Amino acid sequence: MPQAAVAQSFQPSGRKKALLIGINYRGTSAELRGCINDVHAMRELLSREGFRDIAVLTDDQRGPACPTRNNILRACQQLVAGARPGDVLFFHYSGHGAQQADHSGREDDGMNETIVPADYQSGGGQIVDDELFRTLV
C-alpha cells in the first residue's frame, strides 16, 4: 500500500501526546547548537497538528524538565501511561547518540545504539536502545 494511502487511512481517535527532548550540552566538549531550537520548532508544529499534551525536556532547564537519564526514562513512562487504541504518541530526541558494546548477542553488529542524557558524564550513563524499546513499545 502506498505510504500516502496509509497516512490518509489512519484517523487518530484518541489523545495526542508528545515527549520532546533537546540537549545542547552547553559548556562541555560535546556542545551542540540547535537541539533546543529543534524542540521549539517541533513543539510549534505539533501544536498546529492538535497536540495539547506536550512534555519538553531541555538542558537549559533544571529539575524534572532537565533531560537527565532518570528524567528521560520517567518522561517516557509518562508518555505511554494509559495509552489506548487510537492515541497518537510522539517521541522526539535531538542530541548526541552513540554506541555501546552489546553483550547479550541480540545485535547483529554487536553494538547497542544509545542516546546521551545531559548527565552522562556525572554518573547517569547513556540510555540504550533496548531500554527505550521496553519503555516506549
Image (cartoon, rainbow, N blue to C red):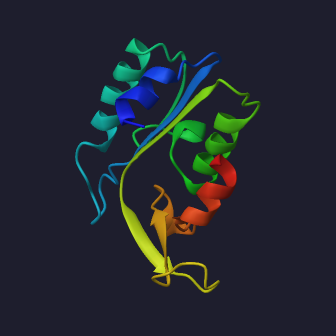
Q: Residue at x 51, y 43 (%)?
A: 66
Q: Residue at x 62, y 40 (%)?
A: 75
Q: Looking at the image, which is closer to me, 117 or 107?
A: 107
Q: Quadrant of residue 103?
A: bottom right
**Residue 115: image location, x then y, percent:** 46, 60
**Residue 111: image location, x then y, percent:** 48, 79
Q: Looking at the image, which is closer to me, 84 or 58?
A: 84
Q: Quadrant of residue 105?
A: bottom right
Q: Looking at the image, which is closer to me, 16 or 13?
A: 13
Residue lying at the far front of the rendered structure: 1
Q: Is residue 29 left or right of residue 43?
A: left
Q: Residue at x 28, y 34 (%)?
A: 37
Residue lying at the far left of the rendered structure: 33
Residue lying at the far right of the rendered structure: 82
Q: Residue at x 64, y 35 (%)?
A: 79
Q: Quadrant of residue 16?
A: top right
**Residue 36: image location, x then y, percent:** 33, 38
Count of numbered circles on the image: 0
Q: Is residue 133 left or right of residue 122?
A: right
From what the image shows, is residue 82 above or below residue 96?
above
**Residue 28: image location, x then y, percent:** 31, 61
Q: Quadrant of the N terminus?
A: top left
Q: Looking at the image, which is closer to me, 89 or 127?
A: 89
From what the image shows, is residue 41 above or below residue 69?
above
